[in-house]
Amino acid sequence: MTVEPTVFVIDDDKAVRLAIKNVLESVGLRAEAFASGREFLKSERADAPGCLVLDVRLPGASGLDFQNELAAAKVEIPIIFITGHGDIPMSVQAMKAGAVEFLTKPFTNDVLLDAIGGAIERSRTAVREESAMQVLRSAYASLTPREREVMALVVSGLLNKQVGGELGISEITVKAHRGQMMRKMNAGSLPELVTMAARLGLRPAGTV
């Protein structure tokens, strides 16, 4: 079942956040509005694509502070900042920290919707990549300690005979472990296995 993407709107001005929410829902987007970052963090959010429309100036911690708080908490969601009092240093700070857009009020609905469309697509890509990584981590976790040793030596460029010499086992045994390892990792070739190892952050055997 595919979960629809959600646009989260955080603005302490009730009229503004409801107006944005109404615009989003009028074009078929799912939207949720909050008066503060605290409210947003307390809410239950589905593990699905989405983005955050965030006012820069909020009571207490600013939108930029909240952006840093989300990063520290490893809450990864594309952010579109909106403000009526923006300046260049502020926008540079926001973009350097990973914001998708920095919109200064007044802006048209089309400009906002275009920004949201790009942010949601970025989120979809990130969700797909994380899902693929979970599958990859699960596959690696299913390997036996010996299969992991064989994988590390194989991706470092050693032939089966050399792997056997390193581990003190026969070449036939290496081939058996290698076949099992390749099957579990769902790797169709050595280059594909090397790519998987790199994505997992594994160091080839013999490297520091």
Image (cartoon, rainbow, N blue to C red):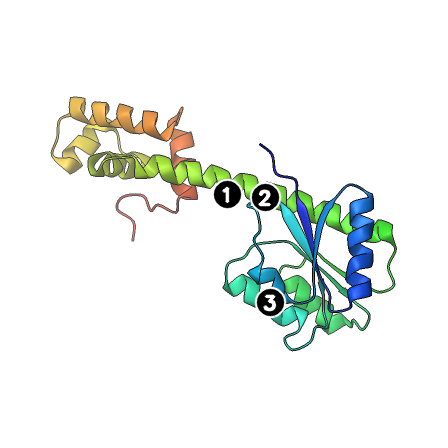
171 horizontally vs 186: left or right = left
Left or right of 137, for residue 34: right
Residue farthest to the bottom, as pictured:
60
The three-letter code of the residue at mark 2 reads Ala
Left or right for 111, reference 36: right
The residue at the point 51 percent across, 65 percent down is: 72
Query: Which of disc 3 and disc 1 is earlier in sequence?
Result: 3
The residue under label 3 is 38
- Front in this rendered view, residue 46 or 193: 46
Q: Which residue is mark 2?
A: 48
List x then y, in percent, for residue 154: 29, 34
Q: CA distance from mark 1 to mark 2?
A: 11 Å
Say which of marks 2 and 3 sits in front: 3
* Camera-side mark, 1 or 3: 3
State how far apart marks 1 and 3 are (Cα): 26 Å
**Badge 3 local density, few (<14 within 10 Å), some, or many (20+)?**
few
Whether residue 30 can be seen here: yes
CA neighbours of label 2 inside 10 A, class few (<14), some (14 to 19), many (20+): some
